[in-house]
Amino acid sequence: MTKIIFLPHVDACPEGAVIDVQPGISICDAALQHGIEIEHACEKSCACTTCHVYVREGGDSLAEATEVEEDLLDKAWGLDPDSRLSCQTLVGKTDLVVEIPKYTINMVSEHRK
């Protein structure tokens, strides 16, 4: 099993979380299965950037982003070198530390307060 450590996020997981997952699952699916509500407005079809996350540790172990993912990431809020789309990033055998950004570009989120 691989561990994903989610850093605290005011809405998605205020206390942070550590979850165990099988390699091959996307970060987004892993989070959702464990009650961490990462936004995914396009239903994980790689058509938006609402599931944007920062992989703060372990990112070197991941497959490189596809050209489509890279193109979409250019539109994400707060893009940095650790940015990935969680719906497209498959967990490997190396533990990950993931940060969910404070904002997304989704202006119509049902979860927004």
Image (cartoon, rainbow, N blue to C red):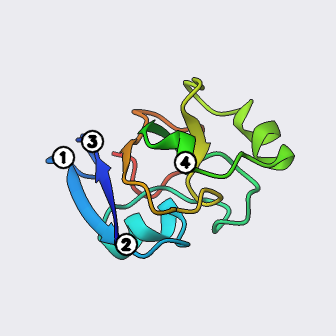
Q: Residues under labels 1 and 3: Cα distance?
A: 9 Å
Of the residues under marks 2 and 4, which one precedes in the sequence? Answer: 2
Mark 1 or mark 2, which is nearer to you? 2
Q: Residue furthest left?
A: 15
Q: Where residue 21 is drawn, which disc sits there?
A: 2
Choose between 113 and 74: the one closer to the eye.
Answer: 74
* 56 lies above or below 86: above
Residue occupied by mark 1: 14
Q: Amino acid at mark 1?
A: Pro
Q: Residues under labels 3 and 4: Cα distance?
A: 19 Å
Q: Residue at left 73%, top 46%?
A: 65
Choose between 30 and 64: the one closer to the eye.
Answer: 64
Of the residues under marks 3 and 4, which one precedes in the sequence? Answer: 3
Quarter of the picture holding the N terminus: bottom left
Q: Residues under labels 2 and 4: Cα distance?
A: 15 Å
Quarter of the picture holding the C terminus: top left
Label 1–label 3 contact, CB within 8 A: no
Mark 3 or mark 2, which is nearer to you? 2
**What element does badge 2 sit on?**
strand
Q: Amino acid at mark 2?
A: Val
Q: Amino acid at mark 4?
A: Ser
Residue occupied by mark 4: 61
Of the residues under marks 1 and 3, which one precedes in the sequence? Answer: 3
Mark 1 or mark 3, which is nearer to you? 3
Q: Where residue 7 is drawn, which disc sits there?
A: 3
**What element does badge 3 sit on?**
loop
